[in-house]
Amino acid sequence: MAAHNNGGIVIAQVKRLAKSGTLRPFQVHVPGVLVDAIVVSAGQMQTTRTTYDPAISGEVFRPLDSFETMEFGVAKVIARRVAQELRHGDAVNLGFGISANVPRILLEEGRHGDVTCVIEQGAVGGVPLLDFEFGCASNAEAMVPSPYQFTYFQGGGFDQSLLSFLQIGPDGSVNVSRLAARPHVTAGAGGFVDITAHARRIVFAGLFTAGAKIAASEAGIAIRREGKVRKLAREIDHVTFSGRRAAAAGRHATYVTERCVLEVGPDGLRVTEIAPGLDLQRDVLAQAEFPLLVPSPPRLMDRALFRAAPFGLTLAGARA
C-alpha cells in the first residue's frame, strides 16, 4: 500500500492464478487495485526448505512423535536449562537460535502443551520449526497477522521471552544486531527491541565464548579448546537490549550458557550456577572481559541436564 500510494510498482509473486471473481473476499489480503504486475512461480517454496507441508498452513495435524528430537550435546544442555525457567501455563515468546529448540525439549519430556509458544511471524502454539525454517510452526493453534502479534509483544502481554545473544555487556546489556568484525553475518535488530522493551522476564541463551571446542557428558562439561572470542565483552558493538533500563524497570533477565547461569543485579552480572566439571576461575571468570560477581559459591547446574536420555523436566506452577 505504501509503495502504491507513493508511485512505486507493486509486483505479486503467486503460485497459481484463479479466475477473476472466484476468490472469497475475506481471504484476499492485497486487493488487485494495488497490484501492477503478477509473476507466476509454480515451484515457489513454502519455507526456505519446504516445498509444501499442510501442517505448516494449518490444514492437517502432524503427529507429535514424528518430530525429530534434538541430538545430545552442548546446545541441548543449554536448551534444557532454559526450559527449567518455564512455568506451567506460560505464554512464551521464542527467538531464533538455541532457544528455538526449547519446544523440542518439552516434546521429548512429555510437556508439550504445558506452555504456549508465540513467535513474531504470527504462529501461536504448535511446534515451531528450526534453523532457517524458523518463523513457521506445525500444528499451530492460531495464525495471527504479524502486526497484531507485535502489538501483543509491545504491550508485554506474554510471560517470558527466550532469546539469544551475540555479546553481553557488564550491565547485562545484549547485542544481537551487529558484530564489528563480521558485519555481513548480522541483519539488524529485527523485532528484538519490540519484544524486549516490555518483556516481564527474559532468558538469554548462548555459548560463553565463540570458537571453543566443548564436550558434554554425564560428567558435565569438558573444554577441549578455549574459544578465541569472548562474548562477555567490556564494550559491546550494539546495545540491542539495555540491561540498565531493564533493571531500573524491575524486569528480570537470566543468561544461560553451557558453563554457567548468570543474573543481572544493580551491581552487575553475578554467577548463580556453574556446570559440573568446570573450574570457576579458569573456565568462567577468566573468560569474561569484565569482572563477574560471585556473592556466594554458585550452585551446580542440575546434573540431570547432562544425561543423553530424557532428564525429567518439571515445571513450576503458574504465576499468580
Image (tube, grey):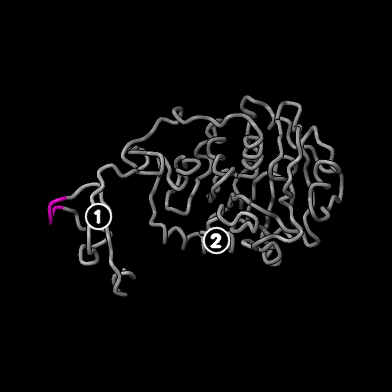
* Badge 1 element: helix
Q: Is residue 23 above or below residue 210?
A: below
Q: Residue furthest bottom?
A: 6
From the top left corner, tell me how far across and down residue 222 is, in percent. 76, 32
Of residue 195 and residue 33, the one placed in the foreground of this image is 33
| In magenta segment, residue 66 | no
Taking the spot 79% from the left edge, 47% from the top edge, the residue there is: 287
Please give the range of residues in magenta.
18-22
- Tell me the kind of residue under disc 1: Gln
* Badge 2 element: loop
Q: Calculate the distance from the C-alpha at mark 2 to the C-alpha at mark 1.
A: 29 Å
Left or right: 13 with respect to 278?
Answer: left
Query: Which mark, residue 156?
Result: 2
- Quarter residue 314 falls in: top right
- Tell me the kind of residue under disc 2: Gly
- Quarter residue 60 falls in: top left
Q: Earlier in the sequence, mark 2 or mark 1?
A: 1
Q: Main secondary structure of the magenta part?
A: loop
From the top left corner, tell me how far across and down residue 318 is, in percent. 59, 47
Taking the spot 66% from the left edge, 35% from the top edge, the residue there is: 74
Q: Within 10 Å of the Cα at label 2, are there few (<14), some (14-19), or many (20+) other Cα atoms?
A: some
Taking the spot 47% from the left edge, 45% from the top edge, the residue there is: 134
Query: Which mark, residue 219?
Result: none
Q: Within 10 Å of the Cα at label 1, are there few (<14), some (14-19), or many (20+) other Cα atoms?
A: few
Q: Is residue 319 above or below residue 223?
A: below
From the top left corner, tell me how far across and down residue 312 is, in percent. 63, 30
Query: Which mark, residue 27?
Result: 1
